Structures are given as C-alpha cells and as structure tokens.
Image (tube, helix red, strand yellow):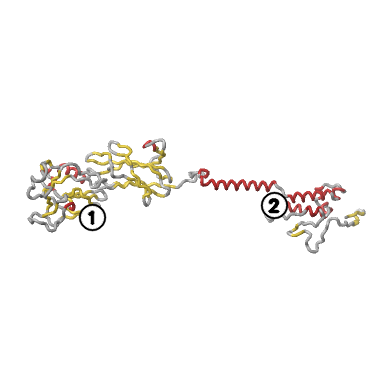
Amino acid sequence: MDVHLSPDRASLVVDHFNYDTISAGDKHDVLLIEKPSALRSDVKNFFGGGGLIALPRAIAQELGSSSQLLTPILRAPETTYSYNPKEEAENVAEPFAVGSQISLVSSMQARNSARFTILGSAEALEDAWFDRTVQGPAGKAVKSSNRAFAKTLTGWTFMETGVLKVGKVEHHLSTISDNKSGNDSVAQLGYLNPTIYRIKNDVTFNIEMSEYSFDHLAPFTVSPDDRLQLEFTMLSPFHRLDLQPMFTTLNSTIFSVTFRLPDQHGIFSFRVNYKRPFMTNVDVKREVTVRHFAHDEWPRSWMISAGWVWIAGIWVTIFGWVAFVALWLWSEPAYEQNQGAALADCLTSSECVLIQRNQPSDCLRPPLLDTLPTRCQQLKRGYGECKRGMIDMRKRFRGNQPIAVSKELEGEKPGQLYAGAAFNSGDGVKPTSGHEDEKVETVVGVDGERRVVR
C-alpha cells in the first residue's frame, strides 16, 4: 500500500504549538487540528467545516509516491514531529517524519471503488472525545468536532457518501435551430439510442447522475473548478466535451451536450470516464457505428460552386457534339453536288436519252449502262464511290479524294480515283476522252435478220 509507519512503536506525534492545554499540558501529545480543507480546488471536500479535531496520542504515517490510489485526508501542521516520550531527550536527532510529511488520517480507494481508511488515533473515535471541551495554547475553550468528523469519516469509508450512481444514458440525432436559444434550440430526431449514425450528424448525449448521501440519493453537483466530460473516441478521442447540467430532478441531475460527429467512419464510443479522489469511479461506454454518406445523401453537383467549371465543360462538349453531328448530317460536300450535276448533264446529252428516249434512271442500269459514253460511266462510278465512302469505315475519317469535275467539263484529263490511284494512270490502260469513233458490227439473228450493233 506504500504507507509507512515509524519503526519505533512507542513514538507519538507531538506538537508544542497546537495541543490541548487541558488534557495534555505537559506531554503535548493531544493535537488540536482544524478540519481539513479541500485537497484540490476540483475535489469535493467531505471532511471540511468549522471546529477543532482532538487527536490524542496519534501515530505518524508517511505516504509513498508509488501509488496514485492513496490520498491523505488530514495532514499534521508544520510544527509537528514524531517523538518517543520514553527517551526523555531534549533534542531529536533523526525524527521519523516532521511537518506536513506526517499524515494523521489516510485513505485508499481501489480501482473498483473499494475503500480503506487508516486513522492514526483510535482514541479520537471514543465517546469521551466527541463533545469534550478542549483549549489551545492561545485560544479559548471550545467543544471538539470529533463527532462530526467521525460521522463523515466512517460515512465515506463505509460507502455512505461519495458514491455516484448513473441512471439513464441516452443519445439521439438532433437538429439545431438558430431562431431559438438554450435547450429549445435542440430538437430530437428519430428514436433513442440508435446503433448507427452518419458522419457530420448532429448528436445529443444525455446522462443522469446521482450522489448517495447517507440515506438518500441527491442530485450530483460538479465543483465549479471541475468538469464532467464526454469523450467521443475510437482509438483516441475525436471529441472531448464538457457535459452541462440541463435540469435537475428530486434525486438526480441530467447532463447533456450536443455536437457534430467527425468526418471519419468506424466504430466509436460515447464514454464518460469520471475519476476523482473520494468519489467512486464512473466509466460509462456506449458503442455506435458511424457510416459514410449514402449515394443519395451527397450534395448535388450544381450546389458545389467548385464544380461549376466542370459542369460547364460537360455541357459545352455535349452541345458541340450535337452541332457537329447536325452539320455533318445536313451538310453535303460541294464536290459531290458538282459531280452529280455533271452526271446529270452527261446523261441528258447522251444518245440513250436524246435519241432512244429512255429514262435517265434506265440508262444507269444494265444493259443500257454499257451503251453510255465512257465519260458518263466514269462519272457514274465516281459518284457511287463517293456515296459508298461516306459509310465505309476505311474512308470515314480520311475521306474520298475530290474529283476535278470542272476539268472534266472543260475536256481536260480527269482525276478520277480508283483503288487509291488514278483510274487512267496505270500502264497499259489507254486513256479515253469519250469522243472516240464507235465500232459498228453486223450480227445475224436466229430469225435470219441482220442487226447493227455499236
């Protein structure tokens, strides 16, 4: 326990400035000490108050520093020291402990809130000292406060005071209104204690706490310099917030806080870890899951100003593509129109139409196609290749090489393409102009008649 007593069992605590002149005028071994003050400003004082405590023939205790569970309740004044009266020496060479090193009443509270108290003077709890009249060296006679001190000391040791009880623990979604203030600005959404939340949700956490005081439960009050805090933690706390008392009932206080969940998904815990000297430990934990945004919970793209540039780029691309397709579908190359006009002029001036009185469409199909001049056949073949190239994947991007129709009309050498080269540029192919003399042959039919074939 790291509590050390004097190796000399006959040693007592002596003070020549704070003793009872009535009962220990010679030996100065009955100490008169005021009730202890708070250990710290954030620790509740269960043993304080007015009056003097009489500690007859107390034994000194010295607390080590290895245990954080030990807490002194009553320390000796600065003028106190440990002394064996049987030695009857005027000077003490090496006292066991002096001044505030001496603890007259010590306590230990284990991690499971079990309590243990060490009192240096058992006689202080006797009935004879409860209402005994005592008087200091420079004071007047007063009644001792041993009765009240014994009540608070035994009450704390036997778990009658300083015992915290946790009631309801609730958490829920909330909405915060800017038009209202205080508790009215927070409204509950959904049901209590859900198991899953979404990132950046507004959440309210409530905890009900009471303090046992001898024979009844009383509302728990946090010291002005102390804080009751909530931790929203995963591996480490993402939030550490002060819980504020919202309202009080006859035997409890409701503490609450509203906050926004972090932008982090995972398994989180609402945790209230309240551990103070002379108070039972409170460790409340509630686990919840925090998820990401669902696919339909993200803000729309047009609501994000940083995305307007990309949205504009998308629509410009769409409108540009539609305009290009429309221009491609409804626009016809000029060379194609000229080639069609040249073919029409060649047909109307041919013998198949002028002399034989055939329809131009009939002249473009066998067997009349072979009777057309070579120039008309070339124009017809080139016009067909141009139309076919519009849907041919090999020529879709490269396109057909334009035909110099105007040069054909002027009688110059045509530039008709066939299979990637000039139609009349190959070796062994005789160029024609379309004005050569026609060959006339006489053929005798099966009926014996003679016919002229050009």
Tell me whether circle 2 and circle 1 mark residues in contact (CB < 8 Å).
no
Q: Position of residue 288 (x, y in %)?
A: 39, 46
> In percent of the image, x 10 and y 55: which residue is there?
84
For numbered disc 1, what is the local secondary structure? loop
| Up-down relation of residue 401 to residue 211 (above or below) | below
Mark 2–mark 1 Cα distance, whole angstroms, equals 94 Å
Between residue 430 and residue 218, name the one nearer to us.
Answer: 430
Q: Which residue is under mark 2?
A: 391
Q: Which of disc 1 and disc 2 is earlier in sequence? A: 1
For the residue carrying disc 1, how many other residues have a C-alpha within 10 Å: few (<14), some (14-19), or many (20+)? few
Residue count near mark 2 (Cα–Cα under 10 Å), binned few <14, some 14–19, many ≥20: few
The image shows a total of numbered marks equal to 2
Q: Is residue 382 left or right of residue 240?
A: right
Please, what secondary structure does the residue beneath circle 2 have?
loop
Residue closest to the eye, 364 or 319 = 319
| Left or right for 222, reference 305 | left
Residue 402 image offset from top left, x and y in percent: 74, 54
The residue that appears at 34% across and 41% down in the rendered structure is 256
- The tag on residue 369 is none
Residue at 63% in and 48% down: 321
Residue lying at the far front of the rendered structure: 138
Position of residue 118 measured from the top left corner of the image (x, y, whole percent): 18, 50
* Residue 435 picture quarter: bottom right
Query: In the image, what residue type sits under mark 2?
Result: Ile
Q: Identify the mark at residue 65; answer none if there is no mark.
A: 1
**Looking at the rendering, in which quadrant would you find the C terminus?**
bottom right
Residue type at numbered disc 1: Ser
Eye-nearest disc, 2 or 1: 1
